[in-house]
Image (cartoon, rainbow, N blue to C red):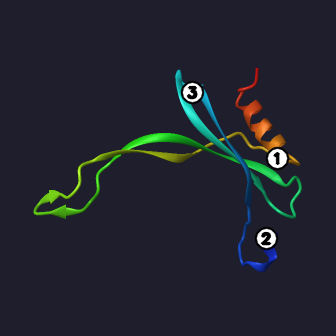
Amino acid sequence: MLDPERYSCSEFYIVEKAIIVVTEIAGVDRQLRIEALRRPGHSPEYSTRGYIEESFVLQQSDIAGGKYAHKPQRTRVWVEYDLPWTARDSADEAIEQALSLMQLGK
């Protein structure tokens, strides 16, 4: 098991569990990734962090002969997504709290 005391880090988190959900945001289905983070030695130990999948068109900056060396490409990237604050004693409880606070429950 990792021992945070062995490293000179100001904070130390372990991604204990992650889920991906598809839900409607502003009338559009979007993919969200919710991670349950464990902070050893703290109580409650678990919080959550969120990401939303975004689509971007990227243009590489390589220029050859006055022209871009590559065409722009569409790519999908996970971008940080603000979740309501969560604090629970298990990974599942932290994820369930995040989903509940986002009003994704039935």
> Which residue does the image show at 52% across and 41% down from the upper left?
53
Q: Is residue 62 above or below residue 91?
A: below
> Which residue does the image show at 74% across and 43% down from the upper left?
85
**Mark 1 → mark 3, Cα distance in angstroms:** 24 Å
**Where is residue 59 shown, x and y percent of the image?**
29, 52
Q: Which residue, given by chain and number where applicable, does mark 2 sit on?
A: 2
Q: Say which quadrant the C terminus sits in.
A: top right
Q: Say which quadrant the N terminus sits in.
A: bottom right
Q: Which residue, given by chain and number where applicable, does mark 1 sit on?
A: 87
> In the figure, is residue 63 to the left or right of 16?
left
Q: Which residue, given by chain and number where applicable, does mark 3 sit on?
A: 25
Q: Is residue 64 above or below residue 85?
A: below
Between label 3 and label 2, give the one nearer the viewer: 2
**Mark 1 → mark 2, Cα distance in angstroms:** 21 Å
**Where is residue 42 shown, x and y percent of the image?**
86, 60
**Where is residue 91 shown, x and y percent of the image?**
81, 47
* Quadrant in the rendering for residue 83: top right
Q: Amino acid at mark 3?
A: Ile
Structural crowding at the residue carrying mark 2, measured as other residues with C-alpha within 10 Å and reported as few (<14), some (14–19) or many (≥20): few
Q: Quick one: SS at disc 2?
A: loop
> In the figure, is residue 89 to the left or right of 58?
right
Structural crowding at the residue carrying mark 3, measured as other residues with C-alpha within 10 Å and reported as few (<14), some (14–19) or many (≥20): few
